Amino acid sequence: MQVSQVVTAAVKAKEGGASRLCMGAAWREVRDNRDFDRVIEMVKAVNEMDMEVCCTLGMLSESQAQKLADAGLYAYNHNIDTSEDDYKRIISTRTYDDRLNTIKNVRKAKLTVCSGGIIGLGETTEDRVSMLQTLANMEVHPESVPVNALVPVKGTPLENQPRVPIWDMVRMIATARIVMPNSVVRLSAGRNEMSTLEQAFCFMAGASSIFAGDKLLTTPNPAFTDDMAMFELLGLKTREAFKNGRPTNTFNGQLETI
């Protein structure tokens, strides 16, 4: 995408109530090239709009993390996805330690961390507990913890996975809220299959943020207007970006658009 396209999307998102813009690239790792230079320009442009800027670009070196921080990046998303024991069954393009090292590089650049996982991959309850334990045992808890429900995609090895029961999502969110009390717990992928009532249970359990926008990287997401109607119905209010301070944990929702 061109920088101007991203700025147009950011303006639309901010007008709709979003306080954070997340930009994703389908890279295994960041390379120091013209594509990365363009991302730097995007970060600078959105940062000037007084929005929180988040990127998810794959593995990141310490120097690359610092370049993003110098450009005004606020958060870096790098999910650990599942437990360390289950990881090799799901992912072969990088190791669990690769994930953790990227998060360490992000911390060294004094960026905030957005890191969570996906349930519904065929993992056990113990895997889910282990994933949350890994996040909760970090020296500093991730400021944002996305909890994703797998959206099966046709043609992939997990295309026939059953839908994640809503109570599994509620348990994950509630547990994340308990073990990482100051983190923003984000109700992420899978919302398109949830009713308003089911999402309400997730907010009651401790979710304090959602991803807003028509698509989450490769999977569909509820329409922005539908989310606004849901917030109105549930009495939830969006809040301003907290670029210059830590978030306070309330039931006010954060909208992040991707």
Image (cartoon, helix red, strand yellow):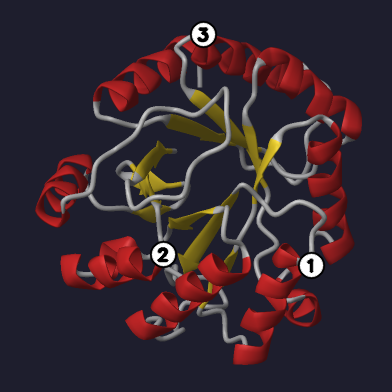
Compare marks 3 and 1 and give the one earlier in the sequence: 3
Quarter of image, res 122? bottom right
Compare marks 3 and 2 and give the one earlier in the sequence: 3
Q: Distance from label 2 to label 1 (Cα)?
A: 33 Å
Helix, strand or loop under label 3: loop
Q: Residue at the spot x=68%, y=49% of the render?
A: 78
| Crowd rating for badge 3 (residues with CA inside 10 Å; few <14, some 14–19, many 20+) | few
Residue 53 x, y percent position in the rendering: 55, 27
Residue 124 x, y percent position in the rendering: 62, 91
- Viewer-side residue, 144 vs 216: 144
Circle 1 sits on which residue? 92
Residue 95 x, y percent position in the rendering: 85, 63
Q: Nearer the viewer, mark 2 or mark 1?
A: 2
Q: Dots 3 and 1: beta carbons under 8 Å?
A: no
Circle 3 sits on which residue? 48
| Crowd rating for badge 1 (residues with CA inside 10 Å; few <14, some 14–19, many 20+) | few
**Camera sees residue 54:** yes
- Viewer-side residue, 119 vs 252: 252
Circle 2 sits on which residue? 206
Q: Nearer the viewer, mark 3 or mark 1?
A: 3
Q: Distance from label 3 to label 2 (Cα)?
A: 31 Å
Quarter of image, res 85? bottom right
Helix, strand or loop under label 2: loop
**In the displayed structure image, the side of residue 193 where residue 162 appears, left or right:** right
Q: Residue at the spot x=61%, y=62% of the render?
A: 180
Compare marks 2 and 1 and give the one earlier in the sequence: 1
Which residue type does callout 3 highlight?
Answer: Glu
- Viewer-side residue, 191 vs 204: 204
Which residue type does callout 2 highlight?
Answer: Gly
Residue 221 x, y percent position in the rendering: 31, 53
**In the displayed structure image, the side of residue 101 where residue 143 appears, left or right:** left
